[in-house]
Image (cartoon, grey):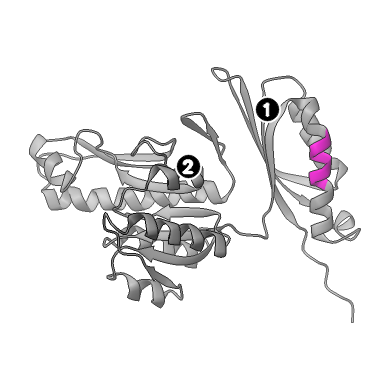
Amino acid sequence: MSTPPRPPSRYALQVVCRSAAGQVAAMAALIERHGGYVEEFAVHDDRPSERFFLRAVFRRAESAESAGTAATALATMRADLDQVAPGIQALHWRLHDLAQRPRVLLMVSRLEHCLVDLLTGWRRGELAMDPVGVVSNHEELRGLAEAAGLPFTYLPITADTKAAQEARLLELVRQQAVDFVVLARYMQVLSDGLCAQLAGRILNIHHGLLPAFKGARPYHQAFERGVKLIGATAHFATPDLDEGPIIAQATESVDHAQSPEDLLDVGRRLECTTLSRALRSVLEHRVFINGQRTVVLK
């Protein structure tokens, strides 16, 4: 009985270069050299920063795949990229094996809506991640995490324990080989040191009313001011509170007939969809940080 053919390996390539000619041709030629078939290819030339961003998804043809293991093929392609990079003025590049899904640590406080939405997207196969656990400064959502088969870590935060708990969090990130940390309505301010150590790896969601309505009960504040538009923002966490590079945003019109509770419902729905969309873009290797901004290639 013949062995069924092995499905081809799939890869995502991200490259950031100084703007120059020949970069698309060089990357297309490299993929072809390694028996790759391009499924997706997107670029963006950012004139203000003089940076060129490229993302390609490709699979290796069956004839190429039979020449060696996927691990060997990946190492060979990476070595080739190292050789090609100086000639195209590449600042940095990453080549991802799409069979290896990013490992994600979810952090929450008491509000469950974003966590529920992310777990639902994961179960449906809409978020290509391996969640490694849930961390919280409260016990309320332990049952939700454990029902999903995820370990729950309780790290209560006070002024006296914050440094020690953040050290435990970093140790968990190292032990679990975490790629990304998602703050799914985690209502604690991370220290500058933690943000710096995990730069470009922490995603946060907040209501899109900042800076007008900070603090408690923002939707009630918005109601009192008669706002006509509310929204949500997903961004990378940085030492500057709620000012990291934005990945995704969403807004929705509202009017005088809607109560504070109505605004809260709309806002939470927007928070869920915006965080999920941002995380999916990151998991699919579409997001590039460009200074204080991001480039998200479709």
What whole-number distance in Å separates the C-alpha atoms at marks 2 and 1? 24 Å
Q: Secondary structure at mark 2?
A: helix
In magenta, the rendered stretch is 77-83
Q: Quadrant of residue 251?
A: top left
182 displayed left or right of 210: right
226 displayed left or right of 132: left
Look at the image and say whether residue 275 sits in the magenta stretch.
no
Which residue in the protein does label 2 denote?
A: 196
Look at the image and say whether residue 80 sits in the magenta stretch.
yes
The quadrant of the rendering that contains the N terminus is bottom right
137 displayed left or right of 92: left
Q: Residues within 10 Å of mark 2 (few under 14, many from 20)?
A: few
Residue 223 in the image: above or below residue 144: above
- Percent across and percent down for residue 10 are 72, 54
Residue 126 in view in this figure? no
191 displayed left or right of 102: left
Q: Amino acid at mark 1?
A: Cys
What residue is drawn where x is 17% and y is 45%?
A: 219
On residue 107, which mark appears? Answer: none
The quadrant of the rendering that contains the C terminus is top right
Which residue in the protein does label 1 denote?
A: 17
- Percent across and percent down for residue 178 are 54, 58
What residue is drawn where x is 47% and y is 50%?
A: 279
> Residue extending furthest bottom?
1
Q: Quadrant of residue 253?
A: top left
What residue is drawn where x is 12% and y is 45%?
A: 220
What residue is drawn where x is 80% and y is 41%?
A: 31
Nearest to N terminus: mark 2 or mark 1 = 1
Q: How many marks?
A: 2
Magenta stretch: helix, strand or loop mostly: helix
Residue 162 or residue 83, whichever sits in front: 162
Q: Amino acid at mark 2?
A: Ala
